Image (spheres, grey):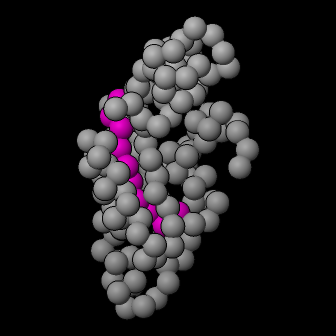
């Protein structure tokens, strides 16, 4: 079964089996080479559950971003202390590295993490700090 959204043979995006913007391309949907799905949300919202289920259904790799925290961050959180932006920086780099490794290998994947601040998401899109965010998102708004 094709994914809900896919790249059509014409190069346009659309729903499988339907032309994107007209034309004679019915039934010529092809899968994207690689897709990374980032499931983000607040603690306890079900990110890991949804991410694992989605990855399982798609046959993709899954990573729980919480598992990429350093031992010191985990200890701090267990003690009930909130993480600072400085605490989160190495974690964001680790999450971005996971994304970049899959992308470089041409593999799709799903990762769950609580990238709640816009600056965190920007860091992830920029590959942990490199200035690639605008290139990856195609300068789209939102």
Residue 132 appears in which quarter of the rendering?
top right
User: Is 53 located above or below residue 1 in the figure?
Assistant: below
Up-down: is 130 above or below 64?
above
Residue situated in front as seen by the camera: 68 or 57: 57
Residue 91 position in % (x across, y down) = 42, 63
Q: Residue at x 35, y 44 (%)?
A: 109
Q: Split into 4 quadrants, where in the image is the N terminus?
A: top left
Q: Nearer the viewer, residue 48 or 114?
A: 48
Q: Residue at x 68, y 20 (%)?
A: 21
Residues rendered magenta in the picture: 106-115
Count how many numbered circles sit on residues in the image.
0
Q: Is 128 one of the magenta-colored residues?
A: no
- Residue 109: say if magenta: yes
Specify the quadrant of the image occupied by residue 85.
bottom right
Question: In the drawing, does residue 78 fall left or right of residue 128?
Answer: left
Q: Is residue 91 visible?
A: no
At which x and y percent is residue 20?
62, 22
Q: Is residue 4 above or below residue 57?
A: above
x and y percent of residue 25 in the render?
Answer: 54, 11
Foreground residue among 87 and 98: 98
Q: Position of residue 29 (x, y in %)?
A: 45, 20
Asked if residue 81 lies left or right of residue 23, the reply is left
Q: Residue at x 30, y 74 (%)?
A: 71
Vertical side of 104 occupied by 127: above or below: below
- The answer to whether any part of residue 21 appears in the image is yes
Residue at image position (45%, 72%) is 45
Q: Residue furthest right?
A: 141
Answer with the quarter of the image where residue 79 lies: bottom left
């Amino acid at each position: 079964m094709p994914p809900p959204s896919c790249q059509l043979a014409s190069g346009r995006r659309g729903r499988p089996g339907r032309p994107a913007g007209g034309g004679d391309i019915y039934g010529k949907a092809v899968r994207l080479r690689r897709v990374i799905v980032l499931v983000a949300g607040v603690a306890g919202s079900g990110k890991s559950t949804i991410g694992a289920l989605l990855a399982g259904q798609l046959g993709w790799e899954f990573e729980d971003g919480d598992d990429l925290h350093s031992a010191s961050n985990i200890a701090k959180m267990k003690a009930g202390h909130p993480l600072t932006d400085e605490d989160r920086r190495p974690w964001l780099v680790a999450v971005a590295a996971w994304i970049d490794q899959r992308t470089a290998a041409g593999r799709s994947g799903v990762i769950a993490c609580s990238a709640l601040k816009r600056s965190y998401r920007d860091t992830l899109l920029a590959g942990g700090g490199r200035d690639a965010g605008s290139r990856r998102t195609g300068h789209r708004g939102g």
